[in-house]
Amino acid sequence: MSFDLTFECVLDLRCAVAESPVYDDRRNCLFFVDIGKGVLHRADLTGAGHVAWTFEHGACCVGLAQSGRLVLAQRDRVVLFDPESGTIAKEIASIEAERPDTRLNDGKVGPDGAFWVGTMHEAADRQRVASLYRVSADGTVERKVGDVICSNGLAWSADDSVLFHSDSRGPWIDRWQFDPATGEISARRRLVVLDEASGRPDGAATDVEGRYWSAGVSAGVLNCFSAEGELVRTHRFPVPTPTMPCFAGPDRKTLFVTSLLPAGASEDSRAGGIFVTRSPVAGAAVHRFEDRRL
């Protein structure tokens, strides 16, 4: 992959922690959250038509649902949100509500139609007390992976047979064999161990050729790995703290990347903005939460 990516800031929002961009092919728009401010955003792919909703209980990540609603992870619960009415339609599940030192973090809808979402330890000592969960539409919550500090980097291969998952504070990236019929995972394998200089793994996305794109939040890079963990290419990012890539557009070759605003950033910094570029390869298709009976 001998190509360079040129990023432009399409939304200069100075988000505290912009995360979880997801492309809605029905509406041809992008949804994403600002975790730091508890805000869900929607915008056209040009950056126009920007709308925002603020939640008292937070907004940590978001996915699409079959009904046209959104599945939204708040601090310690998963809800269905209707962007047409701007209201929460239903609470689906509560997760780690008894733990004030953790919160929900990265999440995506899997090929199995369930919402996969992980927690992170917020305390300064960063203990391995977080987990990755599978949330079904009927409210069933299954703990799938434990012994994590900051669950992140969820993405599935284009053929739905592989689940990628990272721990931003591990910092490592793993892959699992995935059964899209049951949501069962097996054959865990450590793909790569990273550090501050190479880019701690934050949010991620996959392309149709099997590569895994990881936001290196500590190094100002977007790292592209092969399915076997080989570093294919490192793309320099315009601001120091990219948080998650997302393939969008009808051809899924428009690549959006969110970012966070670090403490002490200058007034003219575009950190915390949403950036866009064109990719020579299409992203894997986005899945939808099976909520049609709710």
Image: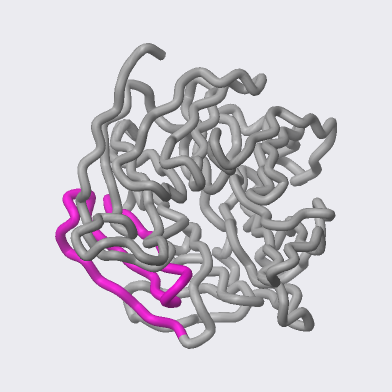
Asked whether 291 falls inside the magenta stretch, the response is no
Judged left or right of residue 62, residue 187 is right
Instruction: Pick the residue in front: 136 or 1.
Output: 1
Instruction: Pick the residue in front: 85 or 218.
Output: 218
Write down the quadrant of residue 75 in the picture: bottom right
Q: Which residue lies furthest to the top in this view?
A: 2
Task: Identify which residue is drawn at 38% across, 27% down.
Answer: 282
Task: Identify which residue is drawn at 37% across, 23% down.
Answer: 281
Pinpoint residue 148: horizontal percent, then vertical percent: 77, 54
Instruction: Look at the image and tell me in which quarter the C terminus lies.
Output: bottom right
Instruction: Pick the residue in front: 135 or 58.
Output: 58
Can see residue 142? no
Pinpoint residue 171: horizontal percent, then vertical percent: 68, 43
Task: Identify which residue is drawn at 79% across, 62% down.
Answer: 127
Q: Give the range drawn in magenta.
A: 28-55
Pinpoint residue 133: horizontal percent, then vertical percent: 74, 59
Judged left or right of residue 99, residue 247 is left
Task: Identify which residue is drawn at 38% across, 81% down.
Answer: 54
Instruction: Look at the image and tell me in which quarter the N terminus lies.
Output: top left
Can see residue 18? yes
From the viewer's perspective, is residue 71 above or below residue 1? below
